[in-house]
Image (cartoon, rainbow, N blue to C red):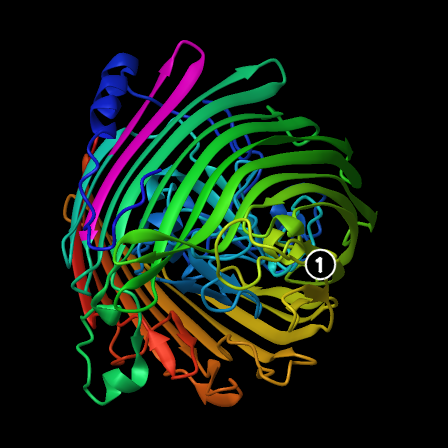
Amino acid sequence: MKHLPPHRRATPLLRPLPLVLGMSAAFCGVSAAQTTAGEPAGSAPTLQEVRVTADHGQADLQGKRSQVTNDSTGLPSALTVITREDIDTLNVGRDISNVFRRVPGVVANSIDQGETGNGFRMRGFATQGTHGADTSVYVDGVPQNMPSSQAGAGHGPAYLEWITPDMIGRIDVIKGPISALYGDQNRAGAVNLTTQTGPIPSSVGLSLESYGGRRASLVLSNTFSEVQSLLIADSYRTDSYRRDGQVARDNIFWKLSTRVGDGLYSLRINHYRADAVAAGYLLLPDLQRGAVDPRSTQSNLPGYSSGERTALVFNRSPAVGEAGWSATAYLESFERVRGATNSSVQHTVGADDRHFFGGRLSRNFVFDDSASLTLGGELRRDEGDATRRIWIAGAPTANYVNNQRLDLLTYGFFAQAQYKPAPDFKLLGGVRRDWFDYDIENRKLPGASTAYKDAVTTPRLGAVWRVTPTLDVFANVAEGFRSPAAEQISGSGSTGPLGAAGGTVSDVSPSKVKSHDIGFTVTPTPNWTASGAVYHTLNEDEIVAQPDGSFRSVGDTTRRGFELETRLRLGASWSVYGSYGRILEARINNPLPTAGARLSVPEHQLKLGAEYRQRFGAGRLTLNADAYLTAQNPYYVGTPQTQLRTMPTYTRYDLKATYDVEKLQFSVFAVFQPRRFAADIAYGTSAGLMISPQPRTQVGASVRYFF
């Protein structure tokens, strides 16, 4: 992994493209069958999809929760399913986290700080800068959360830049830790993403965006003998609204799928590589009084980042129905560097050089339509280096924040059962038992090198009652957990050289939460659906830093709130949706004297949208409009940081028009962010709020040819 000097701008990454073209010619196009959520060519899907938007012919969750199904739609929990069609109507642009923008209660961030992770968070968890932590994220059965990351995003971030919109088949967003199938970081809930199902049309696409954005994408799909193959290549380059921002990113994804006997099998390989330069953050008071240019760079010294990861993933699932064996096995190499600006001459450079392997195996037993039982286990081994080092004037120094060699083994077993004692009533119960077996070599403070062993048990219980054919209600109580970070177990102390004396080993346990939910889904008419949920989450043993540099499992945090959503189809062409999320309480119950009690999460969140579809001339016209608002987001300033402030209200409006005619698809879009100096990513400091200024207007256009 190369460490980019701070002054270097991102350079084009064209090396993967000849490989893409060579593979394209060799395999004559491709197509895929999704092993976890799809069917082989020519067979019908076993599960219906639920659309986020109020689209024509949409389905909803009403009635599905009471069915015995291992699909996420059967959980007694608030759930949103993002389909392939939804993704086609979204402005995803440079940040894949934009696919979550319509999901009720989810804050999706356009961070615009290079390759630093993907900002999405929900239910009052994962405050500013944690990039998807506290939500357990899986892609095709492979966990995506990075434990003890040092590349600028803390413990458990989900780095999803290797995914492009063309790769996504379906995303399930599960609120709360109700499902026992998902492990570490499942405190706010879980995200289960499955990659594309084949066969799909082959295509080539080009797009242009404001501030130098340009993307070329290729999808090749076909069937060779009994094997379906899908090859996706994506090359993306963009500058930034800020003068010193730039990203160069290349992604390749290749998946082979086939049916053998009673199983669907797939093998995929994906490769991602990126370089980026980031303009950093600016102080809000300076912006408001005109002391700095909003397009300028923090401390006049750009930050920078780079990343490279390659994964090989095998999947197996039942070919028909849900009963039978499912399996996942994976190998992955992960490298990431981020240099964060600290002053006019200094960067703190975090680096992860890690290697993973692991898998999961489960068996689902189905007893007619009255009960089911899933038993399984998973294992993950994470080996490599996690470091954070001080650089001065573009050169590394001998001083480190931390430097650790990690050998992290986690494994666990899970069980989940469903039972219908009556046709309109279902019970769900689940439990996980997870173990942690770590070896941590602390090269900065060798005296803190240690082995760590611990385990955690997290049960779940829920119920669904279909009160009438148009109304169902659900309730659950569930526990989830977050593993301790390596730096919380093996403390690194103050910044200094390697091999120093001292060091503290902390006795910490995994952080557990207990979550309670009550919710409903009602369908007053076939074209109108409404749903809502009230939740209360208690984090029973938050890990807190102590004055001596150690960490302890002490105190707790509380989060309470509710979410409401409605979707309505108006005639044959129009559909609308709206959601409102309110966080009633998000606080540290016993804060340190030098810290405030309120957590930095927005109290109010409003999302509205409309879609219009109609035949127009020889083709079909689709218009989408979305509005997004977050308000009353608290933060603290001063020394100590106990002076409470509120971030400016942030609003964003997205417009997109798509015209499909014969083998061509044309799209134009615009993004409006009208509130000056309001941003959806910011953090409080002793001097005030640091924000990443955003442009008021962005526009773009794309064309895609299908063949």
- Residue 261 visible in the displayed image: yes
Let me know if residue 23 is in the magenta part.
Answer: no
Q: Which residues are magenta?
A: 218-238
Query: Which residue occupies 27% across, 47% down?
Result: 4
Residue 610, quarter of picture? bottom left
Amino acid residing under circle 1: Ser
Label 1 sits on a secondary structure element that is loop
Residue designated by label 1:
506
Height in image: 263 above or below 215? above
- Where is residue 139? Give x, y as percent: 51, 40
Closer to us: 568 or 137: 137
Let me know if residue 226 is in the magenta part.
Answer: yes
- Where is residue 90? Give x, y as percent: 32, 55
Quick check: 128 left or right of 374? Answer: left
Quick check: 396 left or right of 429? Answer: left
Query: Which residue occupies 40% across, 44% down?
Result: 336
Query: Which residue occupies 71% across, 47% down?
Result: 180
